[in-house]
Structure formats: C-alpha cells, structure tokens
Amino acid sequence: MDWFLQQLINGLALGSIYALIALGYTMVYGVLRFINFAHCDVMMLGAFAAYFLAPPKAHIFPAESYIGAVAIIILSAAFCTVIGILIEFLAYRPLRRRPKVTALITAIGVSLFLEFTCQHQAVFGAATKPFPKLIPEHDFQHGPISVNSNDICVLAVTTLLLVLLWWIVRRTKVGIAMRAVSFNESAAALMGINCNRIISFTFGLGSALAAVAGIFYAMRAPGIEPLMGIQPGLRAFIAAVVGGIGNLPGAALGGLLIGLLETFAGGIPGLSNYRDGIAFAILILILLFKPAGLLGKAQVEKV
Amino acid sequence: MMPAPARRWLFAALAAALVVSWFSASFNRYYLGVAIDVGINIILAVSLNLINGHTGQFSLGHAGFMAVGGFIAAKLTLLTTLAFFPVSLLVGGIVAALAGIIVGVPCLRLRGDYLAIVTLGFGEIIRVIFQNSQAFGAATGLTGIPERTTIFWTFGAAAVTVYVVTSLVNSTYGRGFVCVRDDEVAASAIGVSPTRYKVTAFVVGAFFAGVGGALYAHHKTVMQPDGFNFLRSIDIVVMVILGGMGRTAGVIVAAIVLTLLPEFLREFASYRMILYALLIIGLMLARPEGLFVLKKRKTAGA
C-alpha cells in the first residue's frame, strides 16, 4: 500500500509533465493536422533557457526563491513562445498547402536541426549539465512515504496551467477562434478570423507550456543535455494520441496515464528494464482497439 | 525500367560484384570497408524506398528491422560456426520479414504521422528488447562475429534488392503500391486492397533491411543495440528523401553520396547532422521531389 501510494505520487508528478507537453502536440495537431516533431526540442530549449537564467549563471534573481523561480519560468516560457512562433513562421507556414507528409518530414528536420545545433560544441555541447535548484527543496516524510516539494510544485503548477488553458480555449475570444480554426479553417477565415495569427498563437501557447514542462522535467532529471527532449517528447506524443489527438482534456488524461503506468512498471523489478518500450506498447494497443483515442471521436474520411 | 532490361542489369551487377570481389584482396582495406558500407546503405535505402516512397507509408523504424536481421544472423553464425554465410543472411532477412508482418499488421489502419510514430515506436521496442535479452549480449551486444561480409555478398545482395524492388513495383501487381500511395480510398474502390499492399511493402522492405543488417553485423563484427536507434533510421530516411521518394535510381545515388561524404568530411563530422537537418528542411521547402531526380515523374501525385 505504501509502495502503491509512493508510486502514485511519483507517477502523477511525471504524468503532469507529460500532460503539459502533450497539450502542445494536441493543440498544434488541432489547428494544423500534423505532428510538430520539434515540440520536444522546444521543451529542451526551455530547460536550457532556465539554466542560463538561473542564479548560478546570471545573478539577476535571488537563489532558491519562489519569486525568482516564477520569474525564470515566465522568461523561459516567453523565450520558447518566440521560438515556437518562429519555427512555425519559417518552416511550416510555407508548406501549409502541401501534402501532409512534407510537413511531417520538415518537422523531423527542424527537430534534428535544433538537437544537433544545440549539441554542437559551440552552442551547448553534448555533455550533461547539472540543473540548478530553483526553489528550496524539502522531503516531506509521512510514515514510509516521502514526498518531494518539487513534485508538489509540479502538480500545483500543472493544475493551475490546465485551468488557465481551459479558460483560454473555452472563454476567451482567441480561444474560440482557435477552436474555429481547428474545426474548419476556411470557414473560420470566412468569419473574419485571421488564421495565420491564430496558428501562431497556438504554437506560442504550446511552446510556453513546453518550456514549463522542460523546466520541471529538468528539476527531476539528473541533468540537462540537448537530446533530453526526445524521450519525454515521444511519451507525451503517445499521451496525446492515447487521449485522442486534438482533444485537450484527452491530452491531460493521457499524460497522467502514461506517467502513472511508466512509474508503476518502473517499480516492478522484472518490468523496469522495459520502461522505454511500455509507452509504445500502450500506444500500439490503443491504436489497435480505439484508434481515435480514449476521448477522441472517430472520424470518417469523406471523399 | 522494364523487367527484361532489369534482369540484364541484375546479372551485370552480379557479374561485376564477382569480378571486383576476385581482386578485392589487393584493395586497400579502408576503401574496401567504405565500399561495403555503400553497398549496405544501398540495400537499406532501396528497401526503405519501397515502403516510404513507392507505397507512401512513412516509416521511421527501418533500423529496427536492420537490428533484427543483424542480431539473428550474427547469433546464428556464432552458434554454428560452420554455417554457410548466405544461410545467415537469409535467416536474418526472414526473421526481419516476420517482424515486418508484426509491425505491418497493426499499422494497416494508420496513416501519415501516426504511422511514422508507431514505426518509430516499434523500432525503439525492438532495440529495448535486444538491450534486455541476455541471449543477445544485453546492452553490450554481440562481439567477435566472424567477418564474412565481402564485396561480392554485399553488392550481390544490393543488386538483388534493387532488382526485386524495381521489378515488383513495375509489375502489374506492383502498380498497386503507387495506387495506394496516391489515393488509398480510390485504391480500395477499384479493388486494390491497401492493407495487403502495405503489409507486402513492409514485409519485403523488412526482409532486405534484415539482410542489410546481417551484412552489417558480419562487416563490423560487433552488434550493439544502441547503434540501431532512431537516428540510424533517420540516416536511411534522409537517403530516401534526398534521392527522391519512389525514385530508385535517385535513392541509390543518395545512398552512395551520403555514405562517401562523411568519409571525406571527417573534420566536419560535428556538422553532419546539422547539415542533414538543413538539407531535409530546404528540400521540403524548395524541391520536395528529391535532389537526385532529373525530371518530374509523369504520374501526377494527388
């Protein structure tokens, strides 16, 4: 039971990071109908932005303070927003009317470009860098269960961001426009929506969430390196598909599910070696039995 | 290429491989190694081209099939030291083809991006399985594999791959691959089963990837699961994209160029993947039909 609770807490913290990344995938898929492979690298850039802004590097913010951490997270998110919008503008916008596979290949290209440029000696280098502590850390002991304060922060911030996102998408004008573009781009354009601006906004929003996720992921990971985004990125993408791609609550649910399953499987001795494969096994099962995802609606292709 | 000249090309290539291998003892070992690399990459790129190019099913898991073929063949050679080398190659290919069926069947219903991710996932799962199975040396992989790959076997296998893929695609049956690529709905409406063609493409592609992997194993003499990750698949995908998807001749040229180029540009090795990435993006923006393609294909892609 204690083991179960412990894994549950770890799984929820990991799952909410996946959920944050998955939201970016699913939002972009909603408006453009393709997988932004470079999303996981935006997440990596977010972590690196925080690394360079953090107190040991730049002496702007007081060390290990909540105010400083919030400022660093906001600045990194702003940086990634710009990067996300730039990627869309430079690489994806010229291809919007081309076959989908062209956009997919370009996305892979952008992803590789970001990864290997950052890995180059002149940029960040391939070595793993220790991620600085942004907030004071405590371990809360409750009997045999220990809860790290970072995990609580991750859960709290994720919940907050999910509510905020839900509010943006459901209640604000730009959110309604986003849903309209996702529903039918040309009809949305006819209603006077500037689709390009909405798509840029979607990329920016998704990238900001990815930056936050990147920082949280870095706080839990042993360190950061340019390829750190690949594994969580793949899992988050799987989470988006499992929840039903294009569906926001689905992405959050899928993220939590993948995080929990992975943590529980990691705790079972025989299965722990296969951790990397588990998410993909889930993906394949979901696609076989419920291709539209848990919360997605099946669509019939019209000719 | 019509079937009859294709067969002539096959025999010419086999004869050339035989003649070259006759003199290979006098060649510089380094050049010989590079030449074998070129041959293996031709096999991999042409077989991936059947899946990605001709059939239009964007697969990112080719390294997985390669790993299956390589590990199985290497294990077989290590277990039965007297095994005839082509038997190892064939067994590697057949087991990889079986893996192709296992991957192909769930992929039937998937398209485009989904398929790309699932094949990527399968590639990763295959790697994780090898990484954790003691029989295949776990994370260290297999070492001390006898060096059996020669110029003859490599280019013989490459010639057979090119022959099989081109004559398959150009046969009456094979027009179905292009049909499925251009419009799946229309294909099924006229009685071409997309499912069957997709699985066929996966199985044939995986078979040759397995053969390529087996050659690779007996060329490098070590097999490490880490060498067959996502980036290895990307290497092959870049060859196919650069050569022009569905253009066998272009893909062969791309495989040769992209194998030789890193050898010449050793000092710029750290820029290799950046260059690949920029090439992919630039090609997709400016010339999506591929770099080594002289004229646009006559059939209109939908």
Image (cartoon, coloured by chain):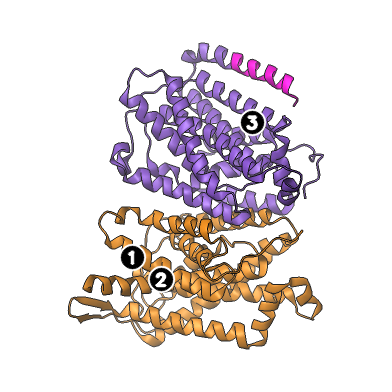
Chain colours: A orange, B purple
Task: Estimate the spatial distance between the alpha carbons at disc 2 and disc 3, rounded to whole Å.
Answer: 44 Å
Q: Can you say which quadrant of the picture contains the C terminus of chain A?
A: bottom right
Indicate the chain on which mark 2 is placed: A
Farthest-out residue, left: A143
Query: Amino acid under label 2?
Result: Gly
Q: Nearer the viewer, residue A114 or A201?
A: A201
Look at the image and say whether residue B2 sits in the magenta stretch.
yes
Mark 1 belongs to which amino acid?
Thr
Residues indicated by labels 2 and 3 sit on the same polypeptide chain: no
User: Looking at the picture, which amino acid does disc 3 mark?
Assistant: Val
- The mark tally for this picture is 3
Where B27 falls versus A174 (above or below)?
Answer: above
Disc 2 on helix, strand or loop? helix
Q: Residues within 10 Å of mark 3 (few under 14, many from 20)?
A: many
Nearer-N-terminus badge (1/2): 2
Q: Residue at x 43, y 20 (%)?
A: B85
Residue underneath mark 1: A263
User: Which quarter shows the N terminus of chain A?
Assistant: bottom left
Residue B177 in the image: x percent, y percent?
69, 39
Q: Could you say which disc has been placed on residue A84 in the image?
A: none
Does the residue at mark 1 contact the one at mark 2 (Cβ under 8 Å)? yes
**Residue A15, located in which quarter of the rendered image?**
bottom left
**Residue position marked by numbered label 2 in the rendering:** A15
Q: Are marks 1 and 2 on the same chain?
A: yes
Tell me the crowding category of disc 2: few under 14, some 14 to 19, or many 20 or more residues within 10 angstroms, Cα based: many
Chain name for mark 3 = B
Q: Which residues are magenta?
A: B1-16
Place of residue B234 in the rendered image (x, y in percent of width and height, measured from the top left): 54, 46
Residue B26 percent coordinates (x, y): 48, 13
Per the image, label 1 sits on a secondary structure element best described as helix
In this figure, which residue is indicated by the disc labeled 3?
A: B165
